[in-house]
Amino acid sequence: MSRWFDQSNILLMSMILFSTVMWNTAKSSIMKCEEAKLKCAFRTGCGAALQHYLTGCAPVLEGNDCSETCQHALIALTSTDEGKELMTCECENELCLQSKQRVEICRSSVTMAMNRTRVSCRIATWICNADALCQTALTYYNKYCKSMFQGRKCTRRCRNSINILTRQEKAAKLNTCQCDGFEEYDCKGIHKNMNVLCFGKVHHGYRDINIEDDRKSEFLTPNMSLRGDGVQILVDRKLFLLSLLIYHILKIIFNIVFLDLLMIKTNPEKISKK
């Protein structure tokens, strides 16, 4: 029996040690906001999106309503991995907590816009520019497709840059985006020229977006009850999955201990001989 107790003590200490390590790992997996900010700032695409967020959302951070400019900046920022970490990071001071709480008023409208299959071409461009590879591909597209923009011809370089751009993951929404009439360029004209000059397609026109309806659906009036700890939902989900994993591992260990005890009770003579 003394041997069994020794084994039990070893298993118990192992379980305690394992649980402590897993808990500390779970806590350390939540990135500090200063670290997340620096990580984003030093990434080409995320850094630009962060700058747009700081300037575009300055009125919101001061306590005003969520503007369309801020919503676009948040969509671009949260489309990057580093930007997502900024939304779930752990604050270390009151200013950080206050900023997170104030920007929560944009959550519902930003979430809805991100979940839409088709977005405006302005939003799609912001998302692409927040990714370094997509931003580079878009730069070459703008450089080599000037003749196509003007309705003259689609050169080989232009077609090649279009192919490269469409292969970028973050350009997916650019492929299906809709012109809303607020672009700083001739959005519908460029779509028409691309279809006709580059792909030889007959252009049937694009369905106009009803601006009022689009804004109502894409940028809903924010729900003020979403303030506070809503940004921690993703983190809580990760901790839940981690706890579930620990539970199953502990369950296996307890089953092993129980089987050892059962063997001792059913075969006491063999155990005593050992």
Image: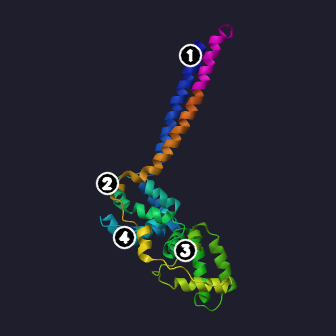
Binning the other alpha carbons within 10 Å of mark 1 as few (below 14), some (14 to 19) or many (20 upward) gives few
Q: Are marks 1 and 3 in contact (CB under 8 Å)?
A: no
Q: Amino acid at mark 3?
A: Cys
Could you tell me which quadrant the C terminus lies in? Answer: top right
Q: Are marks 1 and 2 in contact (CB under 8 Å)?
A: no
The segment highlighted magenta reads 254-274
The residue under the point 41% across, 75% down is: 212
* Sooner in the amino-acid sequence: mark 4 or mark 3: 4
State the CA–CA distance, disc 4 to disc 1. Answer: 66 Å
Foreground mark, 2 or 4?
4
Q: Which residue is mark 1?
A: 5
Describe residue 274's horizontal placement relative to residue 127 as left or right: right
* Sooner in the amino-acid sequence: mark 1 or mark 3: 1
Q: Which residue is mark 3?
A: 177
Describe residue 173's horizontal placement relative to residue 54 as left or right: right
* Sooner in the amino-acid sequence: mark 2 or mark 4: 4
Q: Where residue 84 sits: x, y (%)? A: 48, 58
Q: Are marks 4 and 3 in contact (CB under 8 Å)?
A: no
Residue 273 highlighted magenta (yes or no)? yes
